[in-house]
Image: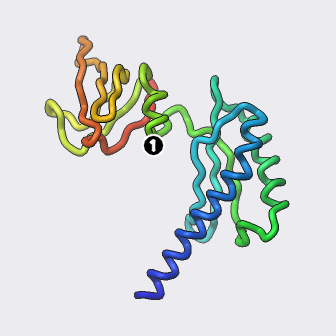
Amino acid sequence: MLALFIANNMEVRRMSTVTETVTDLVTPILDEHHFYLYDIEFVKEGKSWYLRVYIDKDGGITLDDCATVSDQLSEALDSVEPDPIPQAYFLEVSSPGAERPLKNEADYQWAVNHYIHVSLYQQIAGKKVYEGTLMELSDKEMTLDFMDKTRHRQVVIDRSKVAKARLAIKF
C-alpha cells in the first residue's frame, strides 16, 4: 500500500513538473501570436499519455492557430535536454471550447455579461441548475439574469454553493 502511495505521489509530481515546463516553453510562443494560455493537462488515459494545451485569443482560435502552436511547441519540447517527458505521449493543442469551464477568478471576471451555466451543491429557490447572463460578480456572490418561462428574473448565488460553472450557448 505504501509503495502504491509513493508511486502515485511521484506521478503527481512528474505531471506538475511537466505542466510547469510546458508553460515556460509555450508562453513565448503564445505571446508572439497574441494568444493566451487557458490550461495545460498532462494525463494518462488507458495506456496512453496526453499533453493537452488549451489556447485562446480574442475572437476565438482557429485550426491553423492550433497547428502553428503545436508545431512550434513540439520543436521547443524536442530541443530541451534532458527530455522533460521521457515517455511516449500525444500532444494536443486546441481551443477550450465554446462551453469552457470557469476555473479561476479571471475566467469568472471575463464571463461577466456572458451567458453561463451554473450547477449548485444546494438548491436555491428549488433549483440546482441555472443558465443565464452573469450580471454581477463579487468575492462572495454572483447575480444571474435568467428566464423563468417568459419572464426575466434574477437570482443571487453564494459562490460557495457553486459546484461547477461554464460558459453556455444561448438558444
Give the color scheme: rainbow, by chain, secondary structure or one colour: rainbow
Give the x, y percent position of residue 135: 35, 20
Query: Can you see residue 171?
Result: no
Q: Which residue is drawn at 73% across and 72% down?
A: 86
Q: Name the residue under label 1.
A: 103
Position of residue 49 measured from the top left corner of the image (x, y, whole percent): 63, 65
State the residue at coordinates (52%, 80%).
Answer: 7
Within-10-Å neighbours for mark 1: few <14, some 14–19, many 20+: few
- Image: 46 above or below 110: below
Percent position (x, y) of residue 124? 17, 34
In the image, residue 143 sits, relative to residue 16, either above or below, namely above
Quarter of the figure with residue 111: top left
Secondary structure of the residue carrying numbered label 1? loop
Split into 4 quadrants, where in the image is the C terminus?
A: top left
Q: Is residue 94 left or right of residue 168?
A: right
Left or right placement of residue 12 versus residue 37 in this view: left
Give the residue displayed 71% in from the left and 67% down from the top: 85
What is the three-letter code of the residue carrying label 1?
Answer: Lys
Of residue 109 and residue 128, the one placed in the foreground of this image is 109
Q: In this view, does 70 lie to the left or right of 107?
A: right
Q: Total label count?
A: 1
Q: Is residue 160 visible?
A: yes
